[in-house]
Image (cartoon, rainbow, N blue to C red):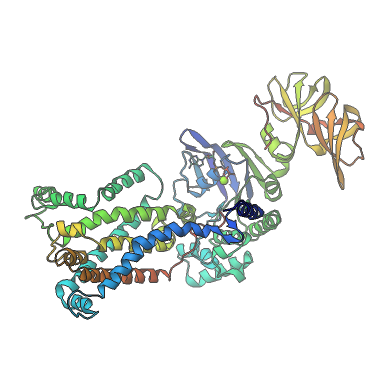
Amino acid sequence: MFQQLEMKSITRSFGDYQALSSMNLSIKAGEFVSLLGPSGCGKSTALNCLSGLLPLTAGEIWLDDRRIDTLPPERRGFGMVFQNYALFPHMSAKKNIRFGLEMRKVSAADQSRRVDSALSLVRLQQHADKLPGQLSGGQQQRVAIARAIVIEPPLVLMDEPLSNLDAALRIEMREEILRIHQTLGLTTIYVTHDQDEALAMSDRIVVMKEGVMQQQGAPQELYNRPINIDVALFMGYRNLLDVTATAAPRAGRLKVSHKGADLDATALTDIADGPLIAAFKPDDVVFSDSGLPATVDSVIYGGRDSTVKLDLEHGGQIHARVSDAVRPGDRVHVSVPAEHLLVYPRPAQPIARP
Amino acid sequence: MTSETIAASTASRSANADPSTVAGRDLRLLMIVPGVLVIVGLFVYPFIYGFISSFNPQGENAEWLANYQRFFSEPRLYETVGKTLWLALPVTILNVGLAVPFAFMLRTPSRGQRLLSTLLVIPMTLGTVLVAEGLMLYLAPNGWLNRSLLELGLLGSPLRLLNNYWGVALSLLITGFPFAFMMMLSYTTGIDPTLARAAATLGASPMEQFRRIYLPLLVPGLTITFCLTFVQAFAVFPSAVLLGAPAGATRVISIAAYEMAYEEYNWSMASTVAMVMGATQLVIVGIVLGLRQFSYRGPVVGGKG
Ligand SMILES: Nc1ncnc2c1ncn2[C@@H]1O[C@H](COP(=O)(O)OP(=O)(O)OP(=O)(O)O)[C@@H](O)[C@H]1O
Ligand SMILES: [Mg+2]
């Protein structure tokens, strides 16, 4: 086992294109870390670099005091669950799981014992002798997990293992993966483009965009304090308002103006002068006596609370999730607590929601 | 056709959602008719004709099996089967055996793969006669090969590579290998490359990835390639005449058939030789395909698409 995995400015280019630029990340034993980002941001590239399937263009990977980025995949011994499972189609579930043990020249008795316990861990004992083609998607996925963990790897890498399953099975398998992670005390790096999945499973989330790591931290940290507008938009739905700073902006509390209306807001980093954008979650909108005047456009009743679409009198439309009973046409005043109204420099190009 | 029946047939057509069916009949089956006609005309008819003709020997009151009795009693006829097999089987095994590792090494698209594929397609397109003529110059006692080897001091006296077994075997290798390689390349690239990567992360060296993953998945393709390469080699004619010893070691079965047809003008006997030839090929192909039953024959991708 190991204490710490350290990626030091790892970079991978394809021709001129940097699929992964200078990523620094250190992972402690036992952690469950998610790599989160939109399609094409370099998540699989990062995993393949770690497992040794893709050579690095630059940078180093250290496992404690051992440099491993120069080793071929078969010498690194990380377990990997592939995006498409990559089960060996000519071997039964059992033989798939046994494969890694055979390669490691584990004794035959140990092989059988460990395969059996892996099969029961993923609850597949009855299906041990079926070929992958005879298993359902969820069962194949569990074989892939069992095959990766039966070799007791120091690190398990999972590349969007749930992306092709239906919603119900996805939730179930989430819990299954977490259970296995905890039961065996594994260290797991988990790639996903689903922020709910990342929030629900991770000790730590790493958000990436276009090959560059944007932010890393605990799920709450990323959800409540996204460091830039891209992370903010990726971590759940946020309303956006164009604003300008009324004083020289810097990190911390500041005053901004939205088309003449003054608002108290928070900047998480030092920001330069210029056009800003304010982002806030629908849950953080409150109806109050002061604040921006608005008219209720539509109400979607959702049990404990309702999602309300509001036309701001100063211009623009926002969504609010509130428990107040309002009806279309009502006039209200809305405000957002300063600590939840986050401002960022406004990007030059129009903002695309993920 | 009257206007009424046209109207009726349009009605039944539009009543049916699937345009390929009319009144419940599946018209798609009709599409195979031209193909079936071609096969019957070009293949089945001559085969049956030859089959019947081989049992109708020429000459007065000859017995119906006389041709076959003659074939299996005259050494210069029945020995052709063994001689042809002795050429075709080793060469086919070598061709397929070499094609597999080459295909494995060149399975990822690269400049090397394109270059080699192009180089290998050339002998296929040149045809056997041109290759044989080239080899006659190249392998001759004073040809390039012998002269180079002599110059380098690797040989004391020139190798005899023409007008014997080796000349024909070499030409079959040159014309058969590209074919086997191209077929194996397409089978190999059809195998999901993440399977080998998965094996690598589980500790398999490149050799083990080949042996445990690629080879078992290639068996079906291997058997087909073997059969097709074998059938090609078994029908060897031009190079056996030009490069071999058509009266001796490389007196292959097609030479016997040629002699019967165009030297003895015994059409019925030529058919008999062809029938023996076909039967021999059928036996070998049958054995190889029979062995395939023992291997895995499913999809070659690893799980969900
Ligand atoms: N072999 C390759 N050659 C050239 N470009 C590549 C190659 N592999 C990946 N890329 C590029 O690198 C970028 C990152 O790819 P990667 O597969 O890491 O994305 P990803 O984050 O895993 O996306 P997804 O969520 O869709 O799986 C993409 O823009 C892709 O086009
Ligand atoms: Mg990916």
Evaluate whether residue A240 shows in this view: yes
Question: Residue at horizontal 56%, vertical 39%?
Answer: A24
Estimate the x, y position of residue A150 in percent, counting from the top left: 55, 62
Residue extending farthest left: B157
| Image height of A295 relative to B292, above or below | above
Q: Is residue B236 left or right of residue A106?
A: left
Q: Is residue A194 left or right of residue A19?
A: right
Q: Residue at x 30, y 52 (%)?
A: B178
The correct choice, above or below, for A83 with respect to A322 in the image is below
Q: Quadrant of the C terminus of chain A?
A: top right
Residue A184 found in image quarter: bottom right
Picture quarter with the N terminus of chain A: bottom right
Residue A319 shown left or right of residue B198 in the figure:
right
Q: Nearer the viewer, residue B100 or B224?
A: B224
Image x and y of residue A188, in percent? 60, 52
Across and down, in percent, residue A27 comes to 59, 46
What is the count of numbered marks?
0
* Residue B120 percent coordinates (x, y): 29, 48
> Would residue A324 appear left or right of A18 to someone viewing this image?
right
Give B160 or A254, whichever is nearer the viewer.
Answer: B160
Please say whether residue B243 is visible from this viewpoint. Answer: no
User: Which one is nearer the viewer's eye here, B103 or B263?
Assistant: B263
- Front-most of residues A22 and B256: B256
